Image: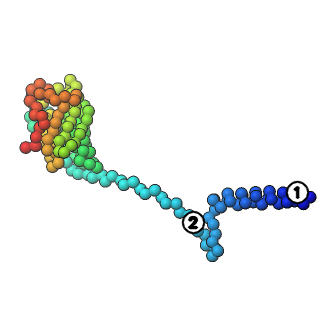
């Protein structure tokens, strides 16, 4: 009988120790003064958030007769200079307000890269974006005026489907790259 009591007492002690050990993880421990102490795990350091800048920039469009450029001021949000260039080009492709015409709207922009002051712009030119000599000249001029307003843009390399071409639409000769004057 002593053996049975000893085994039973041993089982009860082991179970009590296991249960007490499991409960400690969920509850704050009490120190001798009666005040509860918490274990604080270090929180992960927050990742740096990108700073979004907003500027007023000029976007150059044209009139319906393709005789002159029209300046419109827009707000551009960006984090980097490359983002600013991409945002300006995206604005060139939006519907124009008032009498202005956005000649860049039907042009597909495949990529925009900014490296050391050179903007490399790769586009696809669908048939509906092809214009006569005055339209072609205005398309190039609106791009140059829009991008060269930014101090960090020194030149523009315009590619069509990844290739340097002599003329954009067959009328106006392109420089490779076009340099800021």
Nearest the eye: 98 or 102: 102
How packed mark 1 is, by other alpha carbons closer than 10 Å (few <14, some 14-19, many 20 or more), is few
Which mark is in front, 1 or 2?
Answer: 1
Looking at the image, can residue 108 be seen?
A: yes
Compared to 129, does 13 lie above or below? below
Residue at x-position 19% and y-position 48%: 57
Foreground of the two, 50 or 12: 12
- Vertical placement of 180 versus 109: above or below? below
For disc 2, the neighbor class at 10 Å (few under 14, some 14 to 19, many from 20) is few
- The part of the image, by quadrant, that contains residue 68 is top left
- Callout 1 secondary element: helix
Q: Earlier in the sequence, mark 1 or mark 2?
A: 1
Which mark, by number, is residue 38?
2
Q: In the displayed orientation, state which residue is furthest to the front.
A: 3
Disc 1 from disc 2: Cα separation? 42 Å
Which numbered marker is on residue 148? none
Q: Secondary structure at mark 2?
A: loop
Where's residue 27, x and y in %? 64, 62
Q: Is residue 174 left or right of residue 15?
A: left
Which percent across, then down, holds residue 114?
22, 42
Q: Determine the residue located farthest toward the bottom in the rendered image.
A: 33
| Numbered tag placed on residue 4 in the rendering | 1
Residue 139 in which image quadrant: top left
| Residue in view at x 41 percent, y 56 percent | 46
Quarter of the image where the C terminus is located: top left
Total count of labels: 2
The x, y position of residue 106, in whole percent, is: 23, 30
């Amino acid at each position: 009988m002593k053996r049975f009591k000893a085994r039973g007492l041993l089982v009860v002690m082991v179970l009590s120790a296991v249960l007490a050990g499991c409960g400690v993880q969920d509850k704050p421990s009490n120190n001798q003064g009666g005040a509860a102490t918490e274990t604080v795990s270090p929180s992960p350091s927050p990742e740096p958030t990108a700073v979004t800048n907003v500027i007023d920039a000029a976007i150059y469009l044209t009139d319906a007769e393709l005789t002159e450029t029209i300046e419109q001021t827009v707000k551009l949000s960006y984090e980097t200079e490359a983002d600013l260039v991409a945002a300006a080009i995206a604005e060139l492709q939006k519907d124009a307000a008032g009498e202005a015409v956005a000649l860049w709207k039907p042009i597909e922009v495949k990529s925009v890269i900014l490296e050391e002051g050179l903007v490399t712009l790769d586009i696809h030119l669908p048939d509906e974006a092809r214009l006569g000599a005055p339209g072609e000249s205005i398309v190039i001029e609106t791009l140059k005026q829009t991008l060269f307003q930014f101090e960090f843009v020194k030149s523009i390399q315009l590619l069509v489907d990844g290739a340097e071409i002599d003329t954009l639409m067959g009328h106006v000769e392109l420089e490779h790259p076009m340099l800021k004057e």
